[in-house]
Image: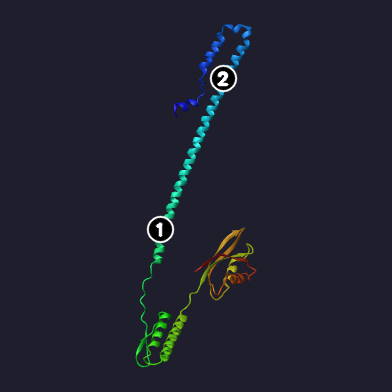
C-alpha cells in the first residue's frame, strides 16, 4: 500500500492550519466589539463553518471511495481466479477429446484395411460317368454359375445333366449327414439358482415339518439345496432354502404354487435371489 492510499484511509484534516489562521484573525480584529460589525462577523463565522462542513464531507466521500475501490478490486481478483480455473478445466476437456479422437482414428484405419486373401479349401473330386474326375466347387454361387457357363460353351462330351444330378445328390447327402450329426449333439441346458424365503404363520409353527413339506415338492429339473432358519421378529423365524432348476421345465410360479399348497404350515413364499448358471 502506497503512502497516498494510507493517508486516504486516515481521518486527517489537511486544511486545519488555514482555518486556525482564519479563526485567529477573527478574534484579533479591532472592530470585533463594535455592534455594527456583528453581522459581518456572523457571516464570516458561517462561511468558516460551511467550509468545515464541506471539508468533512469531502473527507467522508474520499474514505467511502477508497473502501468501494478496494471492494471492487477484491471482486475483480475473485473473478480472475474463477476464470483461470475454468480455463484450466477447458484445457483438460480439450486434451481428453483429442485423445478420444486419435483412438477413433486408429480404429477407423484398422477397420478400413482390406481383409486378407482367403485361400479356397480343397473340395473333393466328383467322378464323371466316362471315368474322368472334376473338382466340386462349393465356395460361391457365382463361381458355380461361371463354371456352368463354361461347360455350356465347350461341350466336349455332350450333355452334362447326369453329372449335375450326381453332384446335387452328393451335396444333399452331405448336408443330411451334417444335420444328423448336429442333431445328435446335446443342447445347452439353461439352469438357474433360486433362493426362496418361506414364512410360517406364527412362532408356534413346526419349522422341521415346514421344511419337510417344502422338500416334498418334486419335479423334473428341480434339485433342492441347503437351507437355514432366519429370525424375522417376535420369535418368528423364516425358512431360507436354495434350489437349482432347469429354466425350460420349472419356473418360480410353479414353485410358489406348489409350496403354498401346504396352508397349515406356510403363509407365503418369496423369491429372495435369482441367478442364472
Horizontal side, residue 216 vs residue 124: left or right: right
Q: Position of residue 224 (x, y in %)?
A: 53, 70
**Quadrant (top left/top right/bottom left/bottom right) for the N terminus:** top left
Residue 179: where, in percent of width, then height? 46, 82
Question: Residue 87: percent from the left, percent from the top?
Answer: 45, 46
Q: Nearer the viewer, residue 27 or 228?
A: 27
Residue 102: numbered disc:
1
> Element at badge 1?
helix
The relative height of residue 241 versus residue 183 in the rendered view (above or below) is above
Counting other residues with Cα less than 10 Å from the Cα at mark 2, is it few (<14), some (14-19), or many (20 or more)?
Answer: some
Q: Which sits earlier in the primary sequence, circle 1 or circle 2?
A: 2
Image point (52%, 66%), residue name: 275
For the residues marked 1 and 2, what is the alpha-carbon distance in whole angstroms?
76 Å
Up-down: is 155 above or below 230?
Answer: below
Residue visible at 40% across and 66% down?
Answer: 112
Residue at 44% over, 82% down: 178
Question: 268 left or right of 127?
Answer: right
For this orientation, the residue located farthest to the left is 132
Q: Is residue 269 above or below residue 165?
A: above
Q: Nearer the viewer, residue 87 or 255?
A: 87
The residue positioned 48% from the left and 25% from the top of the image is 7
Protein image colouring? rainbow
Q: Which residue is mark 2?
A: 51
Q: Between 241 and 53, which is closer to the camera in this rendering?
A: 53
Quadrant in the picture for residue 255: bottom right
Image mark for residue 110 = none
Amino acid at each position: 500500500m502506497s503512502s497516498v492510499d494510507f493517508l486516504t484511509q486516515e481521518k486527517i484534516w489537511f486544511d486545519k492550519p488555514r482555518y486556525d489562521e482564519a479563526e485567529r484573525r477573527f478574534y484579533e480584529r479591532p472592530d470585533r466589539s463594535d455592534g455594527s460589525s456583528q453581522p459581518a462577523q456572523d457571516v464570516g463565522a458561517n462561511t468558516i463553518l460551511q467550509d468545515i462542513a464541506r471539508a468533512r464531507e469531502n473527507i467522508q466521500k474520499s474514505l467511502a471511495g477508497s473502501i468501494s475501490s478496494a471492494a471492487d478490486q477484491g471482486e475483480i481478483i475473485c473473478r480472475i481466479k474463477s476464470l483461470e480455473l475454468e480455463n484450466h478445466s477447458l484445457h483438460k476437456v480439450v486434451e481428453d477429446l483429442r485423445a478420444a479422437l486419435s483412438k477413433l482414428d486408429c480404429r477407423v484405419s484398422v477397420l478400413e484395411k482390406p481383409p486378407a486373401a482367403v485361400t479356397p479349401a480343397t473340395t473333393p473330386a466328383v467322378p464323371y460317368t466316362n471315368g474322368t474326375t472334376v473338382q466340386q466347387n462349393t465356395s460361391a454361387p457365382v463361381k458355380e454359375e461361371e463354371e456352368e457357363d463354361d461347360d455350356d460353351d465347350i461341350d466336349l462330351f455332350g450333355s452334362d445333366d447326369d453329372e449335375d444330378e450326381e453332384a446335387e445328390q452328393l451335396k444333399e447327402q452331405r448336408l443330411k449327414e451334417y444335420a444328423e450329426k448336429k442333431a445328435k449333439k446335446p443342447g445347452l441346458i439353461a439352469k438357474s439358482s433360486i433362493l426362496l424365503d418361506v414364512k410360517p404363520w406364527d412362532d408356534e409353527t413346526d419349522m422341521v415339518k415346514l421344511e419337510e413339506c417344502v422338500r416334498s415338492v418334486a419335479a423334473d429339473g428341480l434339485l433342492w439345496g441347503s437351507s437355514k432358519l432366519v429370525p424375522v421378529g417376535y420369535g418368528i423365524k423364516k425358512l431360507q432354502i436354495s434350489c437349482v432348476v432347469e429354466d425350460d421345465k420349472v419356473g418360480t410360479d410353479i414353485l410358489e404354487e406348489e409350496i403354498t399348497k401346504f396352508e397349515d404350515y406356510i403363509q407365503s413364499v418369496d423369491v429372495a435371489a435369482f441367478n442364472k448358471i
